[in-house]
Image (cartoon, rainbow, N blue to C red):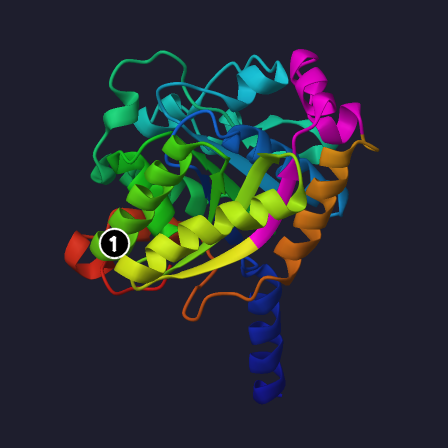
Amino acid sequence: MLDAAVDQTHGLRGLLAPRPVRVIAVTGGKGGVGKTNVATNLGVALAQRGRGVMLLDADLGLANVDVLLGIKPRWTLAQVLSGERELAEVVVQGPAGLRIVPAASGVAGMADQPAAVYGGLIQAFGELTTDLDVMLVDTAAGVGEGVLSFARAAQDVLLVVCDEPASLTDAYALIKLLSTQHGVSRFRILANMVRRARDGRELFGKLLAVCDEYLDVVLEFVGVLPYDDYLRKAIQRRQTVMEAFPRSPSAFAFRQLAEQVENWPRACGASGHLEFFFERMVQPLSVAVGGEA
């Protein structure tokens, strides 16, 4: 009887334990490569596949996601960091059931907070009871402390590039910093706003060549997003292209990307619990170097 009771207790704990969450940092090095569009549309595409998805707008001082979707949140991540509000109060509903954690807009100093400030998010996300499969982190532009902290803690780094010299230069700079100073060794590369599929592969080839010569990293090409007027029209409507023009070329590409994401293998040693993601963010640099991405 005792053994049966113990087995039942373990079974209940397994049911109550939070399920693993894949955390994907969507970043781009420079601004203007379309990473916020990628994060929001990929989030909707995954949600439409029946997945529980949360989008964290991690551009802490210059909110992008709510502006892109025409959402006017009552509270933002700034109030969570300050302890004024619980995370559950801040989350807003987006298209297709996508849950969004909005960032502050125009709050001086928010974007330049040191990693230790994010410690308050450990408890906030650790107590989140909502079932999630994927959390997408839309990072700020550049290579600031916040970008590096979010990217080094994520299980996957999705690096968005476009066919501009500055995009490749900044992407390489970000890869170099994350690999040499933060122990990130694998990057998934997405070519955005390309006219032809082969242009995207050529773009990836250029980045791969310079990384192979100077860095010890693995780059994986995950596909292309086409230059699409329907995407521009969706932005003007303050909608994702997934909902505004579901039969457009870019919507088709996002559905393909979402299918890929579901098949990505998990990094060895990744717990998949959100509180551990934020704990990795605030680890000392000496601990982070050499760890899994």
Q: Which residue is mark 1?
A: 182
The reply to whether the magenta stretch includes residue 93 is no
The reply to whether the magenta stretch includes residue 236 is yes
Q: Position of residue 235 (x, y in %)?
A: 65, 17
Q: Position of residue 292 (x, y in %)?
A: 35, 64
Amino acid bearing label 1: His
Q: Quadrant of the N terminus?
A: bottom right
Q: Which residues are magenta?
A: 222-245
In this image, 169 relative to 15: left or right? left
Q: Determine if residue 17 is in view.
A: yes
Who is closer to the viewer here, 114 or 195?
195
Does residue 61 lie above or below 116 as drawn?
Answer: above
Residue visible at 62% across and 54% down? 261
In this image, 246 relative to 87: left or right? right
Who is closer to the viewer here, 87 or 173?
173
Q: Quadrant of the C terminus?
A: bottom left
Residue visible at 43% across and 49% down? 206
Q: Position of residue 290 (x, y in %)?
A: 25, 65
